[in-house]
Image (spheres, grey):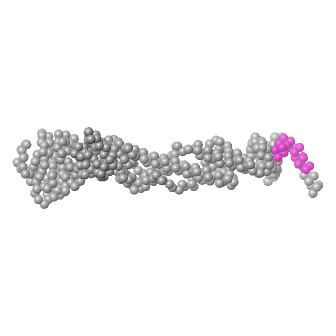
Amino acid sequence: MSENKNPYDEDLDIIYEDDDVRLIEVMTKRGLRYLLPDFDPQVLTQVGVGNESDSFSDDIYFVVGKDPEAEIFMLKDYEDGTKILNVTSGFKNSKTTDVRDVTSKYPQIKENINKIFKGGETFEYLKSILTGKREPKWSDEYPYIDDIKYNSDRPSSSTVVIKFGDSEDFLDVFGIDEDDRYYYNNANHPYHYRDTDTYWYFDNWRDGEMILSDFDERNVEKFDHIISLIAPGLLNSYIKDKVKKFDSLFSNYSDDFINEYASDYQNCIDDSVKEEINSEFDNPFFKFGIKEIGAHYKYEANISVLLTWFRQLNMIGNDLKELLTRLIEKFDKKSRGNWSELEYSINCPDFDYQGLNNTISNSLDNIIDSIEDSEEFVDFDEYNRYLEYIQSLGGFGTVMTIPKSENKIFVVRDLDGSTNKATIAIDTGERDPEYRKLSMDELNSFLYNYELFNENRLKLWKIMKDIY
């Protein structure tokens, strides 16, 4: 075919031609053979073109560069709009491509390409508003279009409000699988509730870890004070032994604040999981000129921006959800999903430990008040003075030496509030120690006047023997 000449007016129509490229409408198989002699028209069925007659019932266009190495593009109308196929390697190996792959190579034919393109209902609806051919009505119903904020003076400045009907449509855009959809929906459900697994929290309490790690200083002191009142002999024992004794008397209190701790901490973890999951969808279309106005369901964009994306991605036959999906697939590199283990690996830095300790403090105060108001103590003030005295000596369970008798050792085992007498275990050199119950004065005499104390004890023993 000679330059700028079309010998078969009924076969070819040159839409545009210059020194670099030709845009030609091909109307018959003969015209195709003339334009592209190396292509077999019989395999046009591979690209959706009927093969029954020599003439094409569909509008078919080709973009052919003048450079022998140039790519060849075919434009054809399909049910869902015009598509561009790269057919450089033949119809059998054709690949759908973006319109900008063509217009970036040949910007001089961009206007002609835009005239040829025919889109689906969404594209044509938006285009008619942009060009001023129609004004949007409240009764207009198009998929994923919630509203058109129409600018009658300048239709191209109108904006489109995009709305997803539910989370499934939204998650489809990002290719989220079924497992991760469960965790997403669970995290974002407005009435999210679940039974809290309290086993770990109670185990942590029984081991004493909760006291050592989560109690503040005031509550550690209150806990030890309670132990000093109910089992002072355990003051220097392992924390697990103290907790066991505490629970033997006050498990109703510990059950309450442990359950509250477990529930509040789980809520904090759930909030952290929700925040982490949702952060992966923070304004996800913003870089495409589509801003978020309602997280995960409502977005807004200029009408011209959307039409440009429809054209550039060769998706003028698609709806807005499909357009957004393609934008994410092609340009978004952010990783999303894999949330099944998130709640086990995430921290809760904002947990209200102050509030937890306030609750525990109130419980411990109630316990202390109940003990001090009970009839278990013959003289509570004297008990406290005796307790402090024992602690000053070295405390319960500590091996101590009688000051003036270095070969005599003893251990204070316990203090009974009902008698205000301490149980003392004295090493006699025999297999079993000798146990005595002593008041504070008696203990003091035992320590600093041991010989006299022992002599008086023997006299008392003889008197009691004579009486009986």
Q: Is residue 17 magenta?
A: no
241 displayed left or right of 312: right
* Position of the C terminus by quadrant: bottom right
Q: Position of residue 373 (x, y in %)?
A: 74, 48
Q: Position of residue 222 (x, y in %)?
A: 68, 44
Q: Is residue 448 magenta?
A: yes
239 displayed left or right of 199: right
Q: Nearer the viewer, residue 55 or 244?
A: 55
**Across the whole image, how many numbered discs are drawn on residues?**
0
Q: What residue lies at 43% left-to-right and 53% top-to-bottom?
A: 185
Residue projecting furthest to the left: 7
210 displayed left or right of 62: right
Q: Position of residue 154 (x, y in %)?
A: 26, 39
Q: What residue lies at 90% left-to-right and 47% top-to-bottom?
A: 456
Residue 423 in view of the camera: no
Chief SS of the magenta region: helix
Q: What residue lies at 35% left-to-right and 42% top-to-bottom?
A: 291
308 displayed left or right of 267: left
Q: Which residues are magenta?
A: 439-460
Residue projecting furthest to the bottom: 52
Residue projecting furthest to the right: 466
Q: Position of residue 194 (x, y in %)?
A: 51, 55
Q: Nearer the viewer, residue 187 or 245?
A: 187
Residue 272 in view of the camera: yes
Q: Nearer the viewer, residue 298 or 387?
A: 298
